[in-house]
Image (cartoon, rainbow, N blue to C red):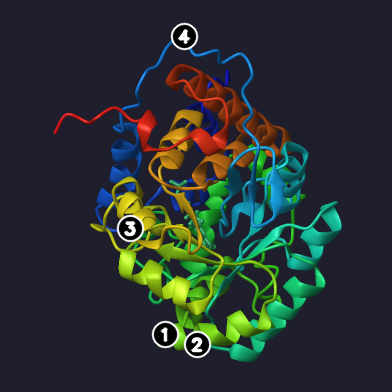
Amino acid sequence: MIIAQISDFREAARRRLPRFLFEYMDGGSYAETTLRKNVDELSDIALRQRVLRDVSQIDVSTELFGQKLALPVALAPIGLAGLNARRGECQAVRAAERAGVPFILSTVSACSLDEVTKAAAKPFWFQLYMIRDRAFMKDLLAQAMAAQCSALVFTVDMAVPGSRYRDYHTGLSGAGDLKGSIWRLLQALARPDWAWDVGLMGRPHVLGNVVPVMQGKSSIGDFFAWMRDNFDPSITWRDLDFIRSEWKGPLIIKGILDPEDALEAAKLGADGIIVSNHGGRQLDGVLSTAKALPPIADAVGDQLTVLADGGVRSGLDVVRMLALGAKGVLLGRAWAYALAAQGEAGVAKMLALIEAEMRVAMALTGVTKISDINRTILAANPA
Ligand code: FNR
């Protein structure tokens, strides 16, 4: 299949993955309104075409949290992405490294911190959830420090999980374990390439970081039950003091959608925030990130570094997010689709596409470096 754009990776992923995995990755919560708005309202942001401004030399590199990046993007934490390709997170971290951008390993990744550390040549970022079992959390934090992770992303928009209807239709949620297992096995058998490459040769299919607290249970259903039962709804800003004091490196709070919460994060002493609605997978009906971002960036100013994600499907979208006030942009489904479609090479190609598209967007809006991207490159949107 010819890959010219990110949506081609999505189609290739749809053809290769068992249905339960594709729908898990592709879907959002409830009526998926926010998922759609993330994409539509971002691509609706009109860029301002400028001409005759010598755009022969364009520099797409930047610096975030003291780290030099070849592009102002990072690969967002995606739970279970490792099942999209054989030992998937290990492939993705290598592609990110080669492209000079951070890879963010999810708490609920398939490959463990240890396995990804061994696959990587350089430090990556780690994403942590607030989990009821604080001893387990402290242990993960210690592992991330030992792995010399160069930033901690702490996700705060998962106090309770949003319902994803597609997962009920595929048997990933709700089905009794035996029924669910048989249903998923049939879906896997309908995708022989994946079944061989990942299903058979890519085992174990576990949440690598969670295995030690699973007491021997190991089916996907068991891991999903663990996720449902172990996110902590009692968490408050005060619980984060503990994280701030334990973690000496850059601390980035992910899942901020409101200016008042952004200011709380600054008060906590966070180095950054990620304006995010979890890719439209938590509370459906909340603002798209394209709409939420500008007032948040205005509210916090230079107090911390604002990153954003949600609905980014091209390099043009990256430039739009930067223009709306982000200093860096996380790519979520974009890399998960690319990994499913073509493994490490797919993620590398996806990042190359993003870079090429960014260069065109910058050239035709008349900017030559990332720090020059701001709201002046946006056309006044007709109201
Ligand atoms: C996610 N996201 C996520 N976030 C997080 O902090 N920890 C996680 O484990 C996951 N897991 C996860 C799984 C899947 C399948 C998806 C699609 C998303 C949210 C993710 O980091 C990011 O915020 C969104 O994916 C951004 O939106 P786009 O780029 O996918 O539209």
Q: Are marks 2 and 1 in contact (CB under 8 Å)?
A: yes
Q: Which residue is mark 3?
A: 29
Q: Which residue is mark 1?
A: 236
Q: Quadrant of the N terminus?
A: top right
* Three-letter code, disc 3: Ser
Which sits earlier in the primary sequence, circle 3 or circle 1? 3
Q: Which residue is mark 2?
A: 239
Q: Quadrant of residue 171?
A: bottom left
Q: Is 145 situated left or right of 136 in this image?
A: right
Which sits earlier in the primary sequence, circle 3 or circle 2? 3
- Mark 4 residue element: loop
- Mark 2 residue element: helix
Give the CA separation, mark 2 to mark 4: 53 Å
Q: Which residue is mark 4?
A: 52
**Relative depth, front residue between 12 and 337:** 337
Q: Residue 353 in the image: state x and y as whole percent.
A: 59, 26
* Three-letter code, disc 4: Leu
